[in-house]
Amino acid sequence: MPTFWHLDARGTIREGDVLGPVVYAPMGLPDSYADLLELFPEGFTPGGWRRLTTPLAALDVPTWGALNLELVLELVRRARFPDKPSRLAAVFAHDSLAMGVWAAGKWREAHQEGPDIFWLVESERFHRGDQNIVQPLLTRTATLMDLVAEATHYWQGKAGAGLAPWWEMVLPGPAHAIRRATREETDTARATLRQMPARAIPLVTNPASLTHGNRRERRARRAP
């Protein structure tokens, strides 16, 4: 089964945990929540739930753009790539520990928090998408037409032009936590990054795009 490296941003994952979407049931949900569950019967991951429930009036312009981008990605997925996993109900990971360490460093730069705890997880299904296809579009000059076109390329698994690809693995769940990365493995990953040529390192043109990390990771259930 394919394996990937997932950042445990809150430090709550344990060996044997099964990561994936859950159905949230907090008190005081509006009636529209029932409509949302019709679209997402399996529920959401913590990052997806946070994006769906953040008050829009509280957002700055870059974050507003990032949420618009997520909406376009979801609409294009449903219309043209229904077999692909929804980002709002997915676990995010990387196919190498080195790129996971790199992404975690960018997360800390943007949010001033986050540990370097990585778990090797396995999942039968996944999508490999280049976030650097859509990330540069979070500018004042991008149009919705631009977002739709590049979201299509994202779900096609194409690499963007002009920037080193930022490959992220979108896992629909269940993703099984196998083991935690050792300190030696993490140190080796950092050494690998230092040896990589600059042109091979992705750029983060908009820190607001670093919003899908599961800062409030929750265990969906414990494997028997």
Image (cartoon, rainbow, N blue to C red):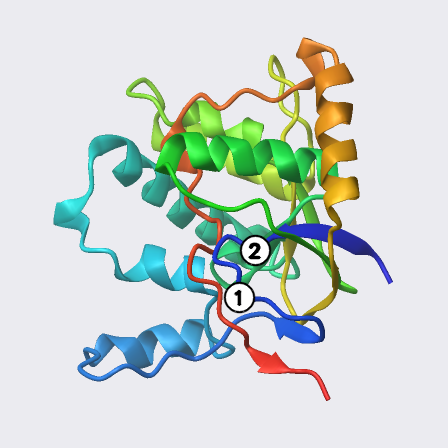
Q: In which image quadrant can residue 179 be found?
A: bottom right
Q: In which image quadrant can residue 222 be found?
A: bottom right
Q: In which image quadrant can residue 188 be found?
A: top right
Q: Is residue 123 visible?
A: yes
Q: Position of residue 150 (x, y in %)?
A: 53, 31
Q: Residue drawn 70% across and 83% down?
A: 223
Q: Residues within 10 Å of mark 1 (few under 14, many from 20)?
A: few
Side of 141 where 46 appears, left or right: right
Say which amino acid is labelled 2: Asp
* Residue topped by disc 2: 8
Name the residue nearer the viewer: 46 or 89.
46
Side of 202 where 145 appears, left or right: left
Q: Is residue 167 visible?
A: no
* Residue topped by disc 1: 12
Quarter holding the N terminus is bottom right
Side of 108 where 33 appears, left or right: left
- Mark 2 touches mark 1? (CB < 8 Å): yes
